[in-house]
Amino acid sequence: MEEDKPGSSPRPAGPALRLVAAGLIVRDGKVLIGQRRPDQPMALQWEFPGGKIEAGESAEQALARELDEELGILATIGAPVTRIRHNYRHGGAVDLQFFVVHEFTGEIEARIYQQVRWVKLEDLRGYDFLAADRGLIRDLAAGKLL
């Protein structure tokens, strides 16, 4: 059995904070969103593409990797847009870093999504987004961030 080292504090109880990078992929006044599949957690809700930041990765590196894996594109990660920390009711917590993406190569494929759509910023409120994204949706629809 491993003992705590002197001066170290015990790990807090509860789920670990998930670090996530997401992309606001923008083209012609629209942003790309993806709908989760029926077999995924939070089924059929909409989100911005991205995913977990792995050990040793920067948020930008993680986002570039995730966009390649999820959509089949090689993206140029732009400036950070916002950062959100959200605690889900079921106890999970996520720290989301959003970056703008104006440039990418390749054709977008819905590799992990039920579907993907290009949506006008002002129309984002009409989609059922993940709870962590809802404040961002309000700001984007109001023209505050992009």
Image (cartoon, grey):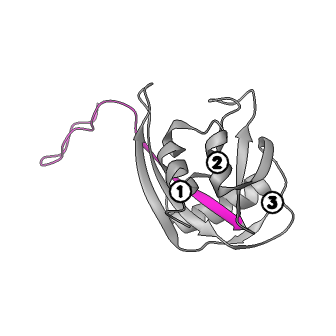
Query: Residue 40 lies in magenta, yes or no?
Result: no
* Of pointers 3 and 2, the one earlier in the residue sequence: 3
Quick check: marks 1 and 3 in contact, CB under 8 Å?
Answer: no
What's the amino acid at mark 3?
Answer: Gly
Query: Horizontal placement of 139 versus 24: left or right?
Result: left
Instruction: Read off the residue under disc 2.
Output: 124
Q: Looking at the picture, does residue 29 appear above or below residue 127?
A: below
User: How packed is label 3: few (under 14 Cα within 10 Å), some, or many (20 or more)?
Assistant: some
- Start and end of the magenta stretch? 1-26
Q: For the point 81% across and 59% down, which residue is it?
A: 72
> Left or right: where does residue 41 sit relative to residue 9?
right
Which numbered disc, 1 or 3, marks the residue closer to the eye?
A: 1
Mark 1: amino acid: Ala
Residue occupied by mark 1? 142
Q: Which of the numbered marks, if any, corresponds to residue 72?
A: 3
State yes or no: discs 1 and 2 in contact (Cβ < 8 Å). Answer: no
Q: Earlier in the sequence, mark 1 or mark 3?
A: 3
**Which is more foreground, mark 1 or mark 2?**
1
